Image (cartoon, rainbow, N blue to C red):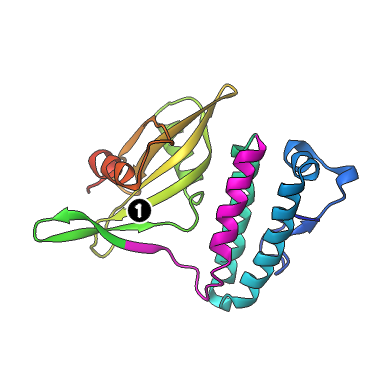
Amino acid sequence: MIFFLLAFPFASDVAAASFDCAKAKGSIETLVCQNPGLSKLDDQLATTYKAALAAVAPSSRQALLKEERNWASYARDICQDAACLEQAYSARIEVLARNEKYIVDTTSCDIPDGSSCRSVVFSRDPNSRIESFNQSLSEQKRSGKIIGCRKLIDLPVGTANGNDSFGGYCVLEDQARRTDVRICNDEMVGHFAIEPADLRTESDKALIDFTNDQCFGG
């Protein structure tokens, strides 16, 4: 059975590792081994990822490797039950199955700006800003750490060398307690905000509005 990634990013194109269920380590591997549905998804992910690696352009290969490694950390660190893992696997398989040649984010013009609009960039890799978010938490002397994100957006100023503001739906772990939050920061000015979020009712628009109101500018 194929499960997650090698611990050696960029070392080779082979980014998934086989493991013996008799030697499963940790709650996630054990859960996958015990659940036939998850085992099937695990194998499907490996097959889909292999096809994605074959399809991607050399210039985007490292981005795909990093993205998949971040996904593995997301699945391991956020999920605590089979339902969460099933959703994480299915969503990741859907992304990989596109077999895209170039690993790029998507952009849409979602924020009204006079007679025009401002762009919102939706990241393929929602976990790419975790270190930055945790640095902001530390600088703001806030307790806890972000252990994974389900969605990430970027609101660029739109000028050369301008500021970018990032917002995400993430999970904050503080003294073994996990809380769904929306969080935002920027790259230049020092904007930062975090608040609890109910992911059952949250939307892209709510995250865009939060990031635009709390962290955009500069």
**Callout count:** 1
Task: Examine the image and state in which quarter residue 123 appears.
Answer: bottom left
**Residue type indicated by callout 1:** Asp
Is residue 170 visible from the viewing direction of this image?
Answer: yes
Residue range highlighted in magenta: 81-107
Q: Nearer the viewer, residue 69 or 38?
A: 38
Location of residue 137 with respect to 18 vertically, above or below: above
Task: Examine the image and state in which quarter residue 173 appears.
Answer: top right
Location of residue 123 with respect to 194 vertically, above or below: below
Describe the element under mark 1 as helix, strand or loop. Answer: strand
Residue where numbered disc 1 is placed: 154
Q: Is residue 151 left or right of residue 190?
A: right
Q: Residue furthest left?
A: 115
Whole-percent x and y of residue 104? Answer: 45, 67
Whole-percent x and y of residue 192? Answer: 33, 37
Which residue is rendered at x = 50% and y = 35% of the image? 171
Q: Nearer the viewer, residue 105 or 128?
A: 105
Which residue is rendered at x = 63% and y = 55% of the image? 69
Q: Residue furthest front?
A: 37
Location of residue 71 with respect to 105 vertically, above or below: above
Task: Examine the image and state in which quarter residue 201 appears.
Answer: top left
Whole-percent x and y of residue 152? Answer: 42, 49
Q: Is residue 182 left or right of residue 77?
A: left
Which residue is rendered at x = 71% and y = 66% of the image? 47
Categorize mark 1 by other alpha carbons within 10 Å: few (<14), some (14-19), many (20+): many
Which residue is rendered at x = 62% and y = 39% of the image? 83
Q: Is residue 218 left or right of residue 137?
A: left
